Image (tube, rainbow, N blue to C red):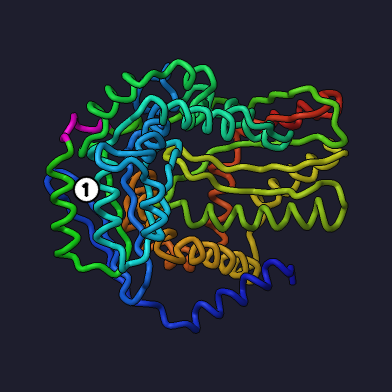
Amino acid sequence: MNLRLYGSLITVLALGCQKAPRSDTTGFIIDGLEVVFKRTPGRPLVAAGFYLRGGLSYGNPEQAGLEPLLLATMMEGTLRLDEVHSRLDALSATLEVVAEYDYSGLTISFPIEHWPAAWELLSDILLHPRLDPVDLERVRDRIISGRITAPTGPAQDASRNANQLYYSRHHYSRRPWGSLESLSRLKRRDLVQYYRGDVTKNRALLVVVGDLDLDELTSHTRRLAKQLPLGPDMLPPALTFDPGKSELKVSRRSLSREHITGLFGAPRPGHPDFPAFTVALILLEDLLYDELHTSRQLAYHPMARAGDRFFNYGLISLSSARPREALQVVFEVLERLTVNLLPVTVLQGRIAVALTRHHRRLAGAAGARDRLAHWKIVGENWEQLDQFAPELQTVRPEQVQLVMRKYVRNIHFAVVGNPRKVPRKLLTSR
């Protein structure tokens, strides 16, 4: 048995033997602000997140990165507090900026005994940001050096190129943190204007996870919501996205091996196909690892992954000094999964892996907060998150074959390496 699979089976068995902590999740609206609250009795930590829906599809493309720049600058100080970070240290709290393709936000985690003070601090940051020009320049430099101009390796470049190729007709082709050009031109007045007009209740989602009293949380949230502007209604995203037929982009570079990434369509979280697709990619990755790495030593660290976006993607990536042979094996594996039905015993093992990953991502208050927010904004709804594990357990071989046929096509490949080693016809054939 594959050792990685064996370890996941043991983990699932251990999880099944443990008594799951009682928890209740509910959603409600307070004075126009949407809230999701998960109560976790007996847990010592609280995690909260204030999210702005829209992501890259919201706002001016010429100001890409403005929203995370604004949120990061808001963290530096308020009109009442000069030093937020020392206050966070005193509360044993962590405050972070989230910048995803479909949303951004501020998240905070802290011990439950500091709940009132930590909530007051978060509210102060959201309602009374200082937005000092000195803070802005410091934060801008930090983002540019850490996220925009930081050196990247060829595998990262292949992944980024594949993303731009696949989403060339969509806002996802840009980066959530912006570009050097867009960040450099932003002024304090842009941040102030955006804060006043776009940090609104109609865009916002508040997620709180912890052992808190619902009435007390409601009271605190109402005080926050009453001071936030309502804003215009959020427009729903477009219903479809068409990446077009298979494409290939090769970036010439002299390397010891070629780095290859391919993107294809995928269902978003909560979609009826998502459980089977999740299992299918786990199976695909295991087969690629066994065939390319273990059996033939053709590729380094082959992967198959599902993304986390509203218009979602699946991904295949590998690095190989013999890319023609390696890619031929990749396409043979894809064909095998499309044509042949899995044995039920093989499928059960991959379902166990999917369950393990699902439970690990939900572990702890911060993990539950992040998943609830993600499924609410990107997925069908946060309620679907509770149904995901039961749905995984009902996946059948026919469903895996169906999603492979339905989604793993029109693959957009990006290669970093020697163009002469790339089988162009093969890479645009599926």
Would residue 267 be found to the left or right of residue 412 on screen?
left
Q: Which quarter of the figure is the N terminus placed in?
A: bottom right
Position of residue 162 relative to residue 294, above or below, is above
Expressed as whole percent of the image width and height from the top left, the position of residue 206 reads 27, 49
Q: Is residue 320 visible to us here?
A: yes
Q: Amino acid at mark 1?
A: Glu
Q: Is residue 242 visible to us here?
A: no
* Point 16% across, 45% down: residue: 225
Q: Is residue 294 magenta?
A: no
Q: Residues within 10 Å of mark 1 (few under 14, many from 20)?
A: some
Position of residue 364 relative to residue 262, above or below, is below
Bounds of the magenta span? 229-235
Would residue 288 be found to the left or right of residue 174 on screen?
right
* Point 22% across, 35% down: residue: 200
Would residue 315 be found to the left or right of residue 225 on screen?
right
Position of residue 202 relative to residue 366, above or below, is above
Q: Which quarter of the figure is the C terminus placed in?
A: top right
Position of residue 1 relative to residue 307, above or below, is below
Expressed as whole percent of the image width and height from the top left, the position of residue 144 reads 55, 28
In this figure, which residue is indicated by the disc labeled 1? 34
Would residue 185 be found to the left or right of residue 339 on screen?
left
